[in-house]
Image (cartoon, grey):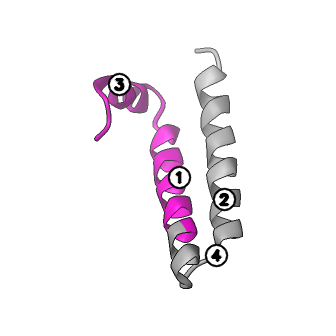
Amino acid sequence: MLTRRWKTLERQRPQLRFVKWGEVVGALFVVGGLVGVGSVVFGIILMLAFGLWGYSILNREG
């Protein structure tokens, strides 16, 4: 469950919705890879990439 602060940030910076869903998809790939249906490496790369993108969005001024 997301906190109230995160929902406020999503309203101010709509790109964070894509970051959230990218992280979820990455986590699903990791879990799928652990049970033999997905790719652990691809999931980790997705999570890192979307995490860095989210970090850059949050550190942007304005």
Q: Is residue 22 magenta?
A: yes
Q: Is residue 40 above or below residue 16?
A: below
The first of marks 4 and 3 along the sequence is 3
- Quick one: label 2, few (<14), some, or many (20+) residues within 10 Å? some
The first of marks 3 and 2 along the sequence is 3
- Number of the front mark, 1 or 2: 2
- Quick one: label 4, few (<14), some, or many (20+) residues within 10 Å? some
Q: Which residues are magenta?
A: 1-30
User: What amino acid is found at the position of numbered circle 3 in the picture?
Assistant: Thr
C-alpha separation, residue under disc 3 versus residue under disc 2:
27 Å
Residue 44 circle label: 2
- Number of the front mark, 4 or 3: 4
Q: Are marks 1 and 2 in contact (CB under 8 Å)?
A: no
Query: Residue at position x 56%, y 74% from top?
Result: 34
User: What amino acid is found at the position of numbered circle 2 in the picture?
Assistant: Ile
C-alpha separation, residue under disc 1 versus residue under disc 2:
9 Å
Q: Is residue 7 magenta?
A: yes
- Quick one: label 1, few (<14), some, or many (20+) residues within 10 Å? many
Q: Are marks 3 and 2 in contact (CB under 8 Å)?
A: no
Give the structural element (helix, strand or loop) at label 1.
helix
C-alpha separation, residue under disc 2 versus residue under disc 4:
9 Å
User: What amino acid is found at the position of numbered circle 1 in the picture?
Assistant: Glu
For the N terminus, the quadrant is top left
Taking the view exactly as shown, the residue that stands out farthest to the front is: 34
The first of marks 3 and 1 along the sequence is 3
Residue 23 circle label: 1
Front residue of 46/10: it is: 46
Q: Position of residue 18 (x, y in %)?
A: 50, 49
Check disc 3 and report the residue beneath it: 8
